[in-house]
Amino acid sequence: MKRKISSLALMFLSMALTLHLTDNALRRAQECPQITDSSAANRTALHAETWLLPSGGLGAMIECEPNGIRIVTSLPGHAGAKSGLRIGDRIVAIDGQSVKGCNEPWAIKQLRGKIGTKVVLDVERGDGLTQRCFRTEVERRHIDTQYSVYSRLRDNELTIRVLWLAPETPDQIAEHLAQLSQRKVDRVVLDLTHLSNGDLESLTEVASMFLPENTLIGQYSQISLCETQKVEIYTQGNQFSDQLTAVEVGPYTARTGELLARAIAENLDVQVIGKETAGLGTLDNRTIRSRASRAGYGVELFDAQGNSLDGNPLKPDFWSWSNLLSPVATGLD
C-alpha cells in the first residue's frame, strides 16, 4: 500500500514539474519576437557575405600619420599599384571620409573588403610646391600572400626586406630596386632579419644581383656517413645594383640568409646593422635543401674561408646607428 502511494506521489510531482516547465517556455516564447524563415535566411546570407566570401585589398603596407595614411609598400601587380599608388603617397580620405588621426585597425577595415568592390581614395603626393592631389578608384583584389619581398621608402632610405629565398625572389627584388631610378634614394638597406629559409640556387641568384661575377659566396657539403668534399658557390654575374649601403641581420637570420649576409659584408663596403645572427648553417632535407643536391642527410654551409656557420654567428658592426637606436629601428612592422 505504501509503495502504491509513493508511486502515485512521484507521478503527480512529475506531471506538475512538466506543466510548470511548459508554462514557462510558452511565456518566454510570447515575450520574445518570433524569427521568421525570411529573417533567418537574411541572417545566413549576411553571415556568408561577411565571413565566408574572400576579401581583398590594395596590396599595400600602410602607416597611420597625424595627417593621413602613408603608403610604405605597394606590391607590384596588385590593385594599389595598378591604380597608380606609389610608395610615399598619403591617403587623406576614404570614400569621402577624412582619415586624419585614424589608427591602423580602422584604416585596414576601411581599405579591405569583398573582392570586386571598389573604394575611392583621395591622395596627396609630394610636399611643398611639388605636391599634387588626386582621386583614384581602386577595385579590391586578391592579395598574394606568397610574396617574399617587401620594401619601404622613408626619408630617402629604401629598405628591402627578404623573407625567404625561392625561384621568384630575384625578380621580386628587381621590382623593388627599380625605385632607385624612379625616386630620390640616398641609402639602400637589405633587411635579412627574417631570412632563414631558401635553397642554394636561389641564394646564388640573389647574391649575383649585388656582387660582381665569380665572387665566392661560400661553400657547402653533404652531411652523410662518409666524408665528402666541400663545394664552392660563386655568383653568376648579372649584377643588378651596386648601391647597397647596409645589410641588416638579427637572431632569426640563419642558414642561407646568414650566408648571404656574410658574402655581402665581406665583399662590399657596407654596414652590418641589427643584432647577432642565429649561427645556424645546416639545411635539413625535410625542409630546406639545394635543388641540385637531393641525396644525403642534409647540407652543411660554410663561409668563403671554409668556416662552418653552426655556432659561428655573424655580429653587426658595434658602432652603428641601428644598435644605438634599436627600439626605433624595427624594420617594416
Image: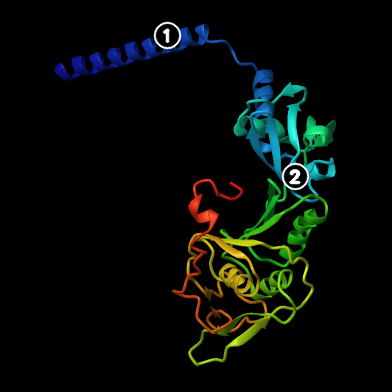
Q: Which amino acid does the dot numbered 2 rest on? A: Ile
> Which class describes the residues within 10 Å of circle 2: few (<14), some (14-19), or many (20+)?
many
Q: Position of residue 327 (x, y in %)?
A: 49, 47
**Is residue 86 left or right of 289 when viewed as pictured?**
right
Q: Nearer the viewer, residue 262 or 163?
A: 262
Query: SS at mark 1?
Result: helix
Q: Which residue is mark 2?
A: 87
**Residue 199 placement: quadrant:** bottom right
Front of the two marks 1 and 2: 2
Task: Kindly state the secondary structure of the residue where label 2 is placed.
Answer: loop
Who's the residue at 53% across and 74% down the image? 284
| Residue 252 seen in the current view | yes
Q: Is residue 32 above or below residue 322?
A: above
Picture quarter with the N terminus:
top left
Residue at position x 69%, y 75% from top? 204
From the viewer's perspective, tell me whether residue 145 is left or right of residue 137: left
Which residue position is annotated with label 1? Answer: 23
Please provide percent x and percent y for residue 288. 58, 71
* 143 with respect to 133 (left or right): left
Task: Please report contact status of discs 1 and 2: CB closer than 8 Å, yes or no.
Answer: no
Up-down: is 6 above or below 169? above
Q: Is residue 79 above or below residue 148?
A: above
Residue 200: x, y in percent?
Answer: 65, 75
Residue type pointed to by label 1: Asp
- Residue 72 percent coordinates (x, y): 69, 44
